[in-house]
Image (cartoon, helix red, strand yellow):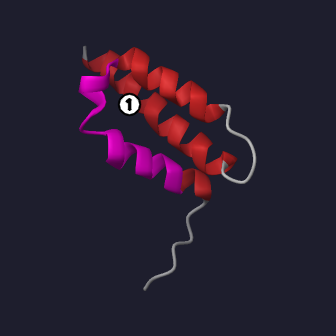
Amino acid sequence: MAKDYRSDFARGYEYARRRYGELAASFGRAALLDLAAALARTDGGNAELARGMAAGLAAMARADRRGS
């Protein structure tokens, strides 16, 4: 199996885009931003991963705003 050399932030960002990308429209912009804000407040060992997920969700919310 190939080793994944991406940072936790990059892995979190890509995970959020893949996991929530198709569902983003059904959540709505406010829900995505609320989830991103909660993830951004995470501390401890998973903080970098959570901040990456928050950035991915916020990017989807911004894209949704431009698309509307």
Dominant secondary-structure state across the stretch colored magenta: helix
| Vertical relation: 54 (above or below) 66 | below
The residue under label 1 is 60
| Vertical relation: 40 (above or below) 14 | above
Which residues are drawn in magenta?
Answer: 11-28
Residue occupying image coordinates x 54% and y 36%: 54
Residue 17 part of the magenta-drawn span: yes
Label 1 residue SS: helix
Residue that extends furthest to the right in the rendered view of this protein: 44
Identify residue type, mark 1.
Met
Residue 44: where, in percent of width, then height? 75, 48
Q: Residue 52's image quarter?
A: top right
Residue 49: where, in percent of width, then height? 60, 50
Counting labels gives 1
Q: Residue 17's image quarter?
A: top left
Residue 3 part of the magenta-drawn span: no
Q: Residues within 10 Å of mark 1 (few under 14, many from 20)?
A: many
Q: Residue 51's image quarter?
A: top right
Residue occupying image coordinates x 25% and y 13%: 68
In this picture, residue 10 sits left or right of residue 30: right
In this picture, residue 23 sits left or right of residue 8: left
Residue occupying image coordinates x 58% and y 35%: 39
Residue 65: where, in percent of width, then height? 34, 16
Q: Nearer the viewer, residue 64 or 35?
A: 35
